[in-house]
Image: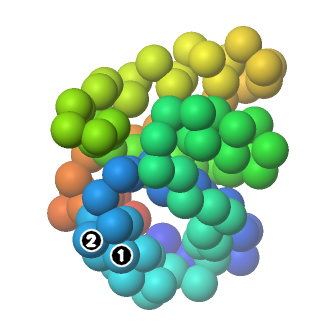
């Protein structure tokens, strides 16, 4: 498990509320991680990341927009146009995230 006094801000980008809730529940174990926002679509995500400057972005690789699924990978280069650095992006499963945070 990671032990650090440093505080990390994160953003969740996911159109599925159940997945957002599951990830937030998983991350409550880590007091040095703080959610600074949740985005449900690409535009919200870009604005939130630029505004909050999180250390981490947990994102679903496909966002549901109405009945269509759209890739969310295009968020990364669009954010980079406005920032001179990028937060760490992870588009993996919650199990993968849990394993990473516990190393």
Q: Is residue 70 left or right of residue 9?
A: left
* Residue 54 drawn at (x, y percent): 68, 50
Q: CA distance from mark 1 to mark 2?
A: 5 Å
> How is colour applied across the structure in the image?
rainbow
Q: Quadrant of residue 84?
A: top right
Provide the secondary structure element on which disc 2 rests: helix
Q: Quadrant of the C terminus?
A: bottom left
Q: Is residue 19 left or right of residue 56?
A: left
Q: Quadrant of residue 99?
A: bottom left
Q: Residue at x 72, y 13 (%)?
A: 81
Return the residue at label 1.
Answer: 21
* Residue 15 drawn at (x, y percent): 35, 52
Mark number for residue 41?
none
Q: Are marks 1 and 2 in contact (CB under 8 Å)?
A: yes
Mark number for residue 18?
2
Provide the secondary structure element on which disc 1 rests: helix
Q: Is residue 60 left or right of residue 68?
A: right
Q: Quadrant of the N terminus?
A: bottom left
Along the viewing direction, whichever of 99 and 70 lies nearer the viewer: 70
Q: Quadrant of residue 67?
A: top left
Residue 1 shows up from this direction: no
């Amino acid at each position: 498990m990671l032990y650090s006094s440093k505080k990390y801000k994160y953003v969740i980008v996911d159109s599925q509320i159940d997945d957002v809730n599951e990830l937030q529940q998983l991350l409550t174990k880590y007091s040095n991680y703080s959610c600074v926002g949740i985005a449900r679509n690409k535009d919200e995500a870009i604005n939130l990341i630029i505004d909050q400057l999180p250390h981490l972005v947990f994102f679903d690789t496909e966002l549901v927009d109405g009945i269509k699924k759209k890739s969310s990978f295009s968020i990364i280069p669009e954010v980079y146009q406005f920032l001179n650095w990028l937060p760490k992006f992870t588009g993996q499963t919650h199990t993968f995230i849990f394993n990473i945070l516990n190393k």
